[in-house]
Image (spheres, grey):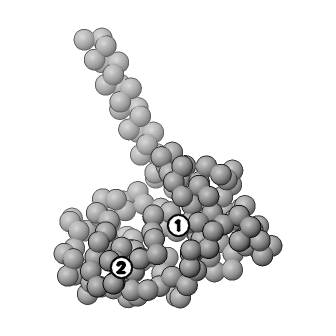
C-alpha cells in the first residue's frame, strides 16, 4: 500500500509540473529533438489555427483537437517577418479563420467540411526553412534572430521553400 501511495503522489506531482510548463509557454521536453522550422507567410496568420492539407490542397489531412490548443503555444515572431513554428506545421499548411482562443473553446473538432469552409489561405507559406533541431539552440529565438539579421540564415538552415 505504501508503494502505491508513493507512486500516486509522484504521478500527481509530475502531472502538475507538466501543466505548469505548458501554461507558462515553454517548449515541451519532447520537442527538443524535433526539427525546428521557421517560416514567412504572405499575410499575418499567427493568431489563426493552422491545419494540414493534402498535396493537391483540396482536402484536410490533419487538424488539432481543441484540447490540443488549450495549452498550445502560438508561433513566435522573429526578425524580418519570420515566425518560429511551435505547432508543427509543414509546407502543406493552410490557415482557418478560427483564432487559437476560439478553437480551444470548442467542445469537439469541427467537421472536415466546416474546416474547409473556414480556410482563409490554402497556400500561405512564402519561405520555409529547417534550422536543425530545437536541441541545437540554447536560446532559439535570440540565435535565429541573429542569423536572420546577419543575412546568414542559409549557412545554418536548409531552405525548403
Which mark is on residue 85? 1
**Residue 11 as seen in the image, left or right of residue 106:** right
Give SS at disc 2: loop
Residue extending farthest right: 150
Does residue 161 sit above or below 84 in this rendering?
Answer: below
**Residue 16 as seen in the image, left or right of residue 133:** left
> For the point 52% across and 88% down, which residue is it?
43
Mark toward the viewer: 1 or 2: 2
Gap between marks 1 and 2 measured at Cα: 20 Å
> For the point 34% across and 59% down, which residue is it?
68
> For the point 20% across and 82% down, which residue is it?
113
**Residue 44 as seen in the image, left or right of residue 48:** right
Count residues near mark 1 (Cα–Cα under 10 Å), then give few for <14, some for 14-19, many for 20+. Answer: some
Does residue 17 sit above or below 94 in this rendering?
Answer: above
Q: Where is residue 128 drawn, in percent x and y?
A: 56, 75
Residue 33 appears in the picture as rendered: yes
Does residue 25 sit above or below 52 in this rendering?
Answer: above
Q: Quadrant of the C terminus?
A: bottom right
Residue labelled with disc 2 = 55
Q: Where is residue 159 drawn, in percent x and y?
A: 62, 73
Does residue 157 sit above or below 21 in this rendering?
Answer: below
Give SS at disc 1: loop
Q: Quadrant of residue 133?
A: bottom right
Q: Where is residue 54 drawn, in percent x and y?
A: 32, 77
Amino acid at each position: 500500500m505504501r508503494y502505491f501511495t508513493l507512486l500516486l503522489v509522484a504521478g500527481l506531482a509530475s502531472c502538475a509540473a507538466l501543466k505548469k510548463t505548458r501554461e507558462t509557454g515553454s517548449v515541451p521536453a519532447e520537442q527538443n529533438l524535433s526539427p525546428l522550422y521557421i517560416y514567412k507567410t504572405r499575410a499575418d496568420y499567427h493568431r489563426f489555427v493552422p491545419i494540414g492539407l493534402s498535396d493537391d490542397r483540396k482536402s484536410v489531412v490533419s487538424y488539432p483537437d481543441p484540447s490540443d490548443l488549450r495549452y498550445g503555444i502560438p508561433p513566435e515572431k522573429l526578425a524580418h517577418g519570420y515566425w518560429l513554428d511551435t505547432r508543427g506545421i509543414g509546407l502543406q499548411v493552410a490557415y482557418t479563420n478560427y483564432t487559437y482562443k476560439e478553437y480551444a473553446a470548442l467542445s469537439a473538432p469541427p467537421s472536415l467540411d466546416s474546416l474547409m469552409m473556414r480556410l482563409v489561405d490554402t497556400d500561405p507559406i512564402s519561405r520555409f526553412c529547417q534550422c536543425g533541431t530545437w536541441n541545437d539552440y540554447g536560446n532559439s529565438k535570440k540565435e535565429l534572430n541573429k542569423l536572420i539579421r546577419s543575412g546568414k540564415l542559409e549557412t545554418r538552415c536548409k531552405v525548403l521553400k
